[in-house]
């Protein structure tokens, strides 16, 4: 079975992006905190359908989680979702830019 990994970007605040993702996909998101991810982030509680919203920021601008997408304040990761194509359509319609897809 192939696994799909998608990355989306947007501007604005973390909570606003999380609400937009939740509304667009019809999913619940839980607030978490991680020093590794730069503080607060949102994530789905589903074990098989991981959507994660993080800040693309760090105290050191050379250490951004996604340096290649430095123009985006917020990154949305959709990992191993069987609904990747459906989510792509809905997230793009909600104003998120689809930045990359990797299929393994």
Image: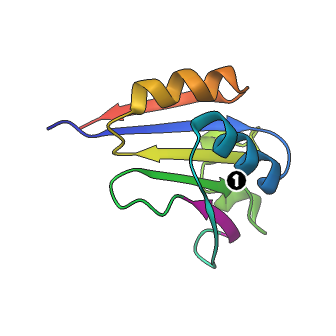
Q: Residues within 10 Å of mark 1 (few under 14, many from 20)?
A: many
The spot of residue 86 in percent (x, y) is 45, 25
The spot of residue 14 in percent (x, y) is 78, 55
In the rendered picture of this protein, how many numbered marks are placed on residues?
Answer: 1
Residue visible at 79% across and 56% down? Answer: 15
Residue 93, quarter of picture: top right
> Is 80 located above or below residue 84 in the figure?
below
Residue visible at 14% across and 38% down? Answer: 1
> Is 20 located above or below residue 31 in the figure?
above
Seen from the viewer's position, the closer of residues 29 and 52 is 29
Task: Give the overall secondary structure of the magenta segment.
Answer: strand
Tell me if residue 34 is in the magenta stretch.
Answer: no
According to the picture, the residue beneath numbered tag 1 turns out to be: 56
Residue visible at 61% across and 58% down? Answer: 29
92 vs 17, left or right, is left
Q: Secondary structure under badge 1? A: loop
Q: Which residues are magenta?
A: 38-43
Furthest-left residue in view? 1
3 vs 45, left or right, is left
Asked which colour scheme the image uses, the reply is rainbow
The spot of residue 102 in percent (x, y) is 36, 34
The spot of residue 66 in percent (x, y) is 60, 49
Furthest-right residue in view? 12
> Is 59 located above or below residue 3 in the figure?
below
Residue 35, quarter of picture: bottom right
Residue visible at 42% across and 59% down? Answer: 46
- Quarter of the image that includes the C terminus: top left
């Amino acid at each position: 079975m192939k696994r799909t990994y998608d990355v989306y970007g947007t501007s604005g605040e973390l909570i606003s992006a999380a609400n937009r993702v939740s509304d667009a996909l019809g999913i619940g998101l839980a607030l978490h905190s991680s020093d590794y991810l730069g503080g607060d982030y949102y994530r789905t509680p589903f074990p098989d359908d991981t959507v994660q919203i993080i800040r693309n920021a760090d105290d050191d601008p050379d250490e951004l989680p996604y340096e290649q997408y430095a123009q985006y304040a917020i990154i949305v990761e959709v990992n191993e979702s069987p609904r990747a194509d459906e989510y792509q359509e809905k997230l793009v319609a909600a104003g998120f830019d689809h930045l990359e897809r990797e299929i393994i």
